[in-house]
């Protein structure tokens, strides 16, 4: 009888350093390199396949939202602090970036990090109520900041009292982002920023600071008994999450060529929270999958709404086409909360497990 061939599939790590590695296996490293190469070539593959150029703009939007959702996951997913004002932190970063670019004449690669730092500073101040408040009460506090932000923008002369603040097109290595190549230039600006910030957060999770955030989320009293300062952890979470939102806001401001308050309202905060829920709270892959799903759903429902309006499938006076997009948006959140609370990241985990050689290889 031939002997069976087995592969080791268990956890055979014997040192803490092995648990702290970013990539456990060589196959994970190879998949990351292959994925990055695919992303670098994706715009040209889309052109070769004859896909609409509007898809590249959607990809840019997805990557910007992914940066903001990573920040939201830092506060809500990994630390358990409900945040309904992430769009306001994006707005702080966007307006700070616009002021640095227009008033101080700073280049975009300096203005955007300054916007992130401004958002981090504001986020730390806004996070102070988290030292006393939890759960729904903290959610109301962040919602209040969202309202205060919108009111402040509409009444401060330095912020044009809510009017648009125009930004000049950027130039990278002699290539200027014009009407014809705007989306392509910004694709190769946003992509390295997204990858760098994602790897940065993945590295933070390996440290004691990242593990302290998760400990506070699971049980802040037990974390305090272990020597962790819950207050410091919560403020750190707000600072990091707001910094990511500020960077996303600065990128979005340059990408849209202007800063307007309508891009950073409560509706956008709810969208970002929905992306985090659909993608999977407390999951880095979910921070990419959530924006991809929500933006794709919005585009599909928009096309379907146009088709319904053109065909006039409903009686006169029944505006079903307009209601289709918000209906699909809300229904997707409810369905994920009911049937898949761990989000699309859990589906991604199941697919990976299916293709692994586990438990035996014959």
Image (spheres, rainbow, N blue to C red):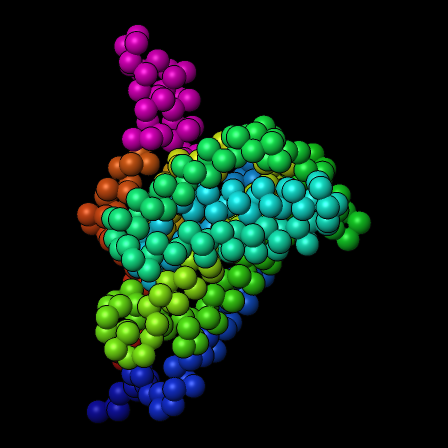
Q: Magenta residues?
A: 298-327
In the depicted view, which residue is nearer to us: 271 or 24?
271
| Residue 336 point in image, percent of width and height | 25, 47
Q: Residue at x 29, y 31 (%)?
A: 327
Q: Judge whether residue 321 is colored magenta.
A: yes
Q: Is residue 57 left or right of residue 106?
A: left
Q: Is residue 294 visible?
A: no
Q: Residue at x 31, y 20 (%)?
A: 320
Q: Is residue 346 left or right of residue 38?
A: left
Q: Is residue 340 left or right of residue 46?
A: left
Q: In terms of image quadrants, where is residue 321?
A: top left
Q: Residue at x 26, y 68 (%)?
A: 220
Q: Residue at x 26, y 48 (%)?
A: 137
| Residue 94 point in image, percent of width and height | 57, 43
Furthest residue toward left: 338
Q: In terms of image quadrants, where is residue 266?
A: top left
Q: Judge whether residue 25 is colored magenta.
A: no
| Residue 95 point in image, percent of width and height | 58, 42
Up the image or down, 229 lies above or below 160; here it is below
Up the image or down, 287 lies above or below 300; here it is below
| Residue 31 point in image, percent of width and height | 49, 68
Furthest residue toward top: 316
If the image is split into quadrants, where does the C terminus sit?
Answer: bottom left
Q: Is residue 324 visible?
A: yes
């Amino acid at each position: 009888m031939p002997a069976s061939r087995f592969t080791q599939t268990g956890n055979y790590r014997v040192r803490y350093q092995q648990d702290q590695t970013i990539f456990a296996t060589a196959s994970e490293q190879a998949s990351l390199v292959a994925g990055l190469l695919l992303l670098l070539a994706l715009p040209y593959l889309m052109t070769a396949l004859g896909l609409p150029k509007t898809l590249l703009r959607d990809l840019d939007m997805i990557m910007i939202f992914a940066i903001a959702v990573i920040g939201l996951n830092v506060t809500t997913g990994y630390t358990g602090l409900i945040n309904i004002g992430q769009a306001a932190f994006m707005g702080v970063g966007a307006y700070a970036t616009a002021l640095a670019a227009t008033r101080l004449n700073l280049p975009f690669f300096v203005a955007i990090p300054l916007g992130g730092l401004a958002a981090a500073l504001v986020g730390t101040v806004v996070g102070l109520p988290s030292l006393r408040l939890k759960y729904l009460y903290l959610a109301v506090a962040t919602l209040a900041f969202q309202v205060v932000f919108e009111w402040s923008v509409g009444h401060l002369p330095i912020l044009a009292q809510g009017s648009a603040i125009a930004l000049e097109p950027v130039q990278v290595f002699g290539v200027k982002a014009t009407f014809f190549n705007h989306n392509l230039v910004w694709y190769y600006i946003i992509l390295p920023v997204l990858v760098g910030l994602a790897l940065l957060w993945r590295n933070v999770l390996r440290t004691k600071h990242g593990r302290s955030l998760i400990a506070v989320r699971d049980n802040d009293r037990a974390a305090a008994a272990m020597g962790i300062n819950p207050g410091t952890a919560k403020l750190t979470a707000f600072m990091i999450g707001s910094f990511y939102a500020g960077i996303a806001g600065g990128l979005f401001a340059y990408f849209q060529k202007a800063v307007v308050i309508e891009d950073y309202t409560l509706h956008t905060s709810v969208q970002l929270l929905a992306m985090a829920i659909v993608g999977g709270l407390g999951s880095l892959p979910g921070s990419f999958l959530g924006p991809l799903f929500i933006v794709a759903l919005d585009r599909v429902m928009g096309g379907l709404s146009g088709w319904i309006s053109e065909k006039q499938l409903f009686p006169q006076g029944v505006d079903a086409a307009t209601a289709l997009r918000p209906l699909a948006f809300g229904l997707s959140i409810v369905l994920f909360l009911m049937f898949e609370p761990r989000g699309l990241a859990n589906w991604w985990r199941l697919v990976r497990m299916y293709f692994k050689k586990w438990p035996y290889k014959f």
